[in-house]
Every structure is written in C-alpha cells, then in structure tokens.
Image (cartoon, rainbow, N blue to C red):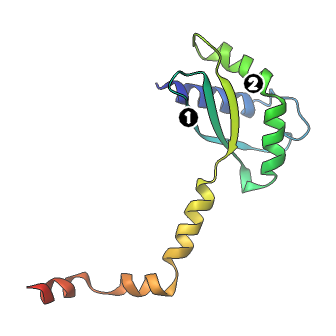
Amino acid sequence: MRVGEQVRHAIAEILAQGSVHDADLEGHIITVPEVRMSPDLKLATIYVMPLGGRDTELVIAALDRNKKFLRGEVARRVNLKFAPDLRFRVDERFDEAERIEKLLRTPAVQKDLEQDPDSDREEEQ
C-alpha cells in the first residue's frame, strides 16, 4: 500500500474515532478522499471534506490547531522514518464535478449530444 494511502487510512480512522478533542470538529463527519505525499515523504497534503460541505474553513482551522496531535498519531500508526508534516486542504473535486455536471446539462451541450454521430460519418465517405 502506498504511503499516502496509509496516512489517509490513519487520519480517517483518527477522525472517525473522535480522538481529536476540539469543539469545532464535534458534530462533523469528515471524509478524507486523498492524501498526497511529497517525494521525500516529509510532507503530507491531506484533502478533507466535511459531510455536506459545510463549515469547511472552521474544520480546516480546527485540524490545523490539532496538527501536532494528529502528526503524533500518524507516526504511531504508519511506519515511517520521519513523521510527515501535515497540511490540510479542502477537497474541491466535489465542486468541480458539480460544475461539470451543470455544464453537461446546458442546452448547447445537450444539442451537441443529441446529434447522431453516424450522420457525420456518412457525409465524410
């Protein structure tokens, strides 16, 4: 298993267990869809998304406040030479997917999709 995936599992488990005691995190279910490691494995960029996408800035701030605790927990759970520095970011892929979905539903795109692809081939021959 890749190191980023191990760190992702560790962070997700720590958050799911409620091990981080911070009022701003209570009542939030946080998903951890991705962790990107730097090539030297000394920095982990952790992408998170609170369920429903609410209070993202509050959640990121709370995770940043508890970075030292989380780093120690990751070090205990993932066997690495050095515990990586943790950097938290909002995972905006959901927003991007929604934007693309809206684009696909626009009348101009629908019109293009409705054209019969076989009719173009017949004209070319």
Point 89% across, 33% down: residue = 22
Q: Secondary structure at mark 1?
A: strand
Circle 2 or circle 1, nearest the eye: 1
Residue furthest out toward the left: 125
Question: In the rendering, at what x and y percent does residue 65 appear?
Answer: 84, 31
Answer above or below: position of 69 versus 27: above
| Disc 1 target residue | 36
- Label 2 or label 1, whichever comes before in sequence order: 1
- Write down the quadrant of residue 42 in the picture: top right
Of the residues shown, which amino acid type is indicated by label 1? Arg
Question: In the rendering, at what x and y percent does residue 87 appear?
Answer: 69, 33
Quadrant of the frame with the C terminus: bottom left
Answer above or below: position of 8 versus 98: above
Question: In the rendering, at what x and y percent does residue 89 appear?
Answer: 69, 43
| Disc 2 target residue | 70
User: Who is closer to the viewer here, 51 or 119?
Assistant: 119
- Write down the quadrant of residue 81 in the picture: top right
Answer above or below: position of 103 versus 25: below
Left or right: where does residue 90 sit relative to residue 57? Answer: left
Point 67% across, 13% down: residue = 76
Point 64% across, 36% down: residue = 46
Point 67% across, 20% down: residue = 74
